[in-house]
Image (cartoon, grey):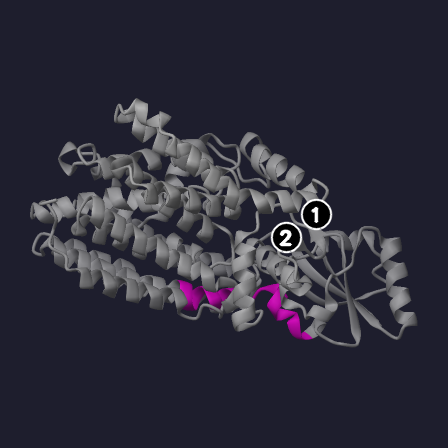
């Protein structure tokens, strides 16, 4: 199209290269500690230890939370790099880079290179986007394959070529192996709404959709059938009914809230550039005139509305629509630059308020946590960002928009590099799992757990200690400990402070007591020798 702001393709490759550096920078330096990372990384390790590509387990027990695709990728990475933090996150990074790349190339194909570059830039500067793709969780895989499936689905509607509908089926089948039926339902609804809005009703009767459905089930169904058989239906019951239907109809694990939370999640998640999102709906931006941006709007709307009415709400849930929100914002930025206008002041004010809140809020949050109190001052490392934003605001009327965007991009690139590559690992190395590692990794000790315990311990223990026996009453715990003593084995018991009242503290000695970072429990390590 002829309204593209002139951006050479080489600038996209520079952007992708810098994003690659940012995502891989000290990728393995942060320990596997937070709950989702710990459970997913450990589950993949246990499957690899058993040479089992079907049944996911955590601490030897069936895990029904997620399907299998991300475990497969992690198992491959473990074989390539060994079982470690870098390997657990390696393919997540590739999914992030892939999401940025396909966003650029499909947008360049269907709109223009200017919109494509700025859409990619929105994603590459998003702190939440970058953080998510440095985690050993299923969402990076879901986001990439869902985004690819939606782009191919749009391409099929526009061209009617076989390759696009087959690729749509393949990508959405892989997305379903990453997260479940939501990976088909929401993209399918978005494509359906787009076809209906275009008044192309008869296309819904196209026999190619039946062929695509067959391809989808040939790829997605075999593992679900295999795990159903291998677990006697237990996985099917736990995954489809508890972790899908129940999450939608009932609040789980305290992750609920009002309707407005999900739009706020999307807004905050795509900062800084999302600060200008209120400007994208002006008619002159061409959202409604361009089929691709119109389709992007429907994708955004469907994901935001669906997860807003869902009873369980988490920050990662609407992330498959982030590329499409980025396209809408990129379309607006392209228009502003093409028309030689200035970026509106309100967006920079929003960025400044958030940028001020990060070091100040971070400082007080670290001061409130005993383990991180000594490093609280390091939160001020990112205080350069509000200074840069003040400088931009002061010079906004004298600078042209390209210079403003370049300055903004450099500032946030450095901010994200410092935050995800340096501050986050520094803070989370002070977690109770890492800090007690030297204590409990003693070959002369058996390791057991009592009632509740931090899931991060399992990934950080040696294979010889797995699975960790869990005891749910003090008598059975005491019997197990005494049996170990008869075999000349001392015992470490991992538990939490809230469970101490139910054990005979005179029989054991407390050797470690550390509060879980930014969580309520306090981890306790008991010893009996």
Quarter-of-image position of residue 455:
bottom right
**Residue stretch rendered in magenta on the structure:** 420-438
**Which of 164 and 428 lies nearest the eye of the viewer?**
164
Residue 348: x and y in percent read: 22, 49
Contact check, label 1 and label 2, Cβ < 8 Å: yes
**Residue visible at 21% across and 44% down?**
110
**Mark 1 and mark 2: Cα distance apart in space:** 8 Å
Count neighbours of disc 1 (C-alpha within 10 A) and say few if under 14, some if 14 to 19, many if 20 or more: few
Residue 8 position in % (x across, y down) = 15, 60
Residue drawn at point x = 59 percent, y = 38 percent: 252
Query: Which residue is disc 2 drawn over?
Result: 54
- Taking the image as shown, residue 128 lies to the left or right of residue 231, namely left
Quarter assignment of residue 130: bottom left
Picture coordinates of residue 265 (x, y %)?
Answer: 40, 42
Say whether residue 429 is magenta.
yes
Residue 347: tell me if it is visible.
Answer: no
Query: Residue 119: within the magenta?
Result: no
Tell me the quarter of the image containing the N terminus: top left
Camera-nearest residue between 492 and 241: 241
Query: Is residue 104 left or right of 245 when viewed as pictured?
Result: left
Q: Residue at x 49, y 70 (%)?
A: 29
Residue annotated with mark 1: 230
The single residue placed furthest to the right in the displayed view is 486
Secondary structure beneath dot 2 equals loop
Please give left or right for residue 46 compared with residue 374 in the image.
right
């Amino acid at each position: 199209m002829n309204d593209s702001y002139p951006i050479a393709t080489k600038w996209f490759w520079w952007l992708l290269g810098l994003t690659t550096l940012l995502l891989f920078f000290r990728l393995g330096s942060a320990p596997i500690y937070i709950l989702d990372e710990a459970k997913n990384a450990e589950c993949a390790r246990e499957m690899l230890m058993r040479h089992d590509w079907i049944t996911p387990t955590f601490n030897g027990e069936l895990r029904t939370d997620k399907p299998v695709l991300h475990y497969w990728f992690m198992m491959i990475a473990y074989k390539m790099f060994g079982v470690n933090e870098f390997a657990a996150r390696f393919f997540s990074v590739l999914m992030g880079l892939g999401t940025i790349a396909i966003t650029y190339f499909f947008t360049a194909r269907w709109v223009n290179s200017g919109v494509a570059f700025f859409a990619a830039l929105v994603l590459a500067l998003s702190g939440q986007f970058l953080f998510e793709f440095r985690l050993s969780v299923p969402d990076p895989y879901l986001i990439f394959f869902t985004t690819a499936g939606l782009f191919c689905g749009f391409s099929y509607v526009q061209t009617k070529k076989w390759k696009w509908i087959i690729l749509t089926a393949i990508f959405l089948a892989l997305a379903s192996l990453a997260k479940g039926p939501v990976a088909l339902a929401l993209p399918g609804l978005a494509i359906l709404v787009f076809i209906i809005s275009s008044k192309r009703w008869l296309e819904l009767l196209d026999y190619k959709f039946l062929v695509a459905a067959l391809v989808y089930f040939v790829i997605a169904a075999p593992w679900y059938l295999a795990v159903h058989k291998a677990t006697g239906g237990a996985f099917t019951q736990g995954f489809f009914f508890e972790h899908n239907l129940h999450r939608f109809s009932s609040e789980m694990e305290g992750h609920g809230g009002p309707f407005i939370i999900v739009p706020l999640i999307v807004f905050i998640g795509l900062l800084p550039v999302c600060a200008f999102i209120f400007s994208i709906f002006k008619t002159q931006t061409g959202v409604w005139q361009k089929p691709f941006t119109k389709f992007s709007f429907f994708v955004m709307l469907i994901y935001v509305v669906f997860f807003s009415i869902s009873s369980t709400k988490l920050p990662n849930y609407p992330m498959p629509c982030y590329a499409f929100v980025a396209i809408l914002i990129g379309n607006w930025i392209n228009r502003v630059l093409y028309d030689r206008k200035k970026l509106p002041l309100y967006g920079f004010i929003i960025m400044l308020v958030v940028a001020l809140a990060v070091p100040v809020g971070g400082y007080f949050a670290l001061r409130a946590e005993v383990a991180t109190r000594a490093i609280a001052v390091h939160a001020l490392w990112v205080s350069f960002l509000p200074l840069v934003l003040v400088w931009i605001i002061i010079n906004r009327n004298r600078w042209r928009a390209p210079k403003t965007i370049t300055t903004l991009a450099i500032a946030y690139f450095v901010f994200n590099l410092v935050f995800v590559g340096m501050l986050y690992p520094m803070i989370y190395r002070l977690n109770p799992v890492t800090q007690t590692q030297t204590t409990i990794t003693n070959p002369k000790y058996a390791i057991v757990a009592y009632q509740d315990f931090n899931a991060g311990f399992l990934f950080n223990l040696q294979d010889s200690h797995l699975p960790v026996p869990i005891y749910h009453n003090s008598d059975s715990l005491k019997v197990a400990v005494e049996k170990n003593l008869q075999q000349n084995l001392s015992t470490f018991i991992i538990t939490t402070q809230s469970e101490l009242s139910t054990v005979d503290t005179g029989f054991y000695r407390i050797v470690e007591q550390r509060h879980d970072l930014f969580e309520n429990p306090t981890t306790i390590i008991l010893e009996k020798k």
